[in-house]
Amino acid sequence: MFALLAPAVRLAFTFGIPLRELCDWLRLAYFQETRRRGQRMREAARTLDVSMRTVAMLSSELKQNFLDAQQQVGLPRRVEFMLWAAPLSAARLRQVLRGIEPGAVDRALETLLEQGRIREVPGRTTRYEVVRSEFRLVDEKGWLARIDGLENFMGTVANAVYGRFFRNEPRAFARTLSFHVRADSAERMRELYENTIWEALRAMDAEAKGKPDSTMLDLSILWAPYDYLEHEEET
């Protein structure tokens, strides 16, 4: 836990965020996780070991500051990802997405339909499926989309930590490399991802579609200048 908190603390230090404010964010994030797990208010109070009054305050703060933005961008992404794994009905989505208001799920489906990212599958019960075979969402310009991408990335980090530290999971893999590159190498690294890594993963996904032994994995790739924060503070 100490190591996992380091990135947040390093950024807080860089921007001069007081410890008390950082603790407030941590408490709010903890409450958000109870909602994501489908816990009701009283259950959340027991999990956080706080009063119902505090839980009500956290709920109000979450709605005012984050909930609308997350449901606007993050929820459609989550729904699309679930439908990429398998076609589902609206009722099934509402059941799986515990802690999310049914109306928010319906709005996410409407957004995806309007954007042409999913389509309806006719039948006794209408189901939804993704339109494209591969799954990749990149929006470098939208601030909310970038925050949602960050949360998704950090979720992959948490899954890898759990698999490697607590379950000896061979499918959980992590490596950090430090190496020298020329000043003009950034574009070559981006091309390596686009033309080699992404294409190989897309082929693997196509081979696994519909196979009984297939499993879903999360992969996150990132790079940045070595000790970027520390070097920025020195300049």
Image (cartoon, rainbow, N blue to C red):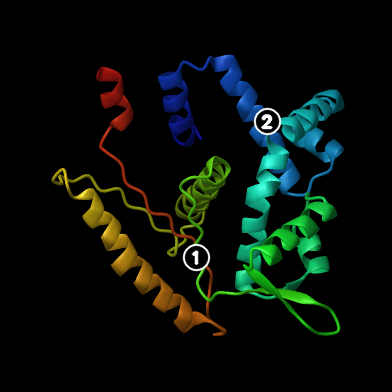
In the picture, the quarter occupied by the C terminus is top left
Mark 2 is on which residue type? Answer: Leu
* Helix, strand or loop at mark 1: loop
Instruction: Give residue 125's mark.
Output: none
Horizontal and vertical percent position of residue 191? 27, 61
The mark that comes first in sequence, 2 or 1, is 2
Instruction: Give residue 217's mark.
Output: 1
Q: Residue at x 54, y 85 (%)?
A: 211
Horizontal and vertical percent position of residue 169? 47, 61
Q: Is residue 171 left or right of residue 123?
A: left
**Residue 114: which quarter of the image?**
bottom right
Q: Residue at x 44, y 33 (%)?
A: 7
Residue picked out by circle 2 = 28
Question: Dot 1, crowdedness within 10 Å: few (<14), some or many (≥20)?
Answer: few
Count of number-bearing discs: 2
**Residue 31: which quarter of the image?**
top right
Q: Residue at x 81, y 85 (%)?
A: 123
Mark 1 is on which residue type? Answer: Leu
Question: Seen from this angle, which residue lies furthest front?
Answer: 114
Q: Quick check: marks 2 and 1 in contact, CB under 8 Å?
A: no
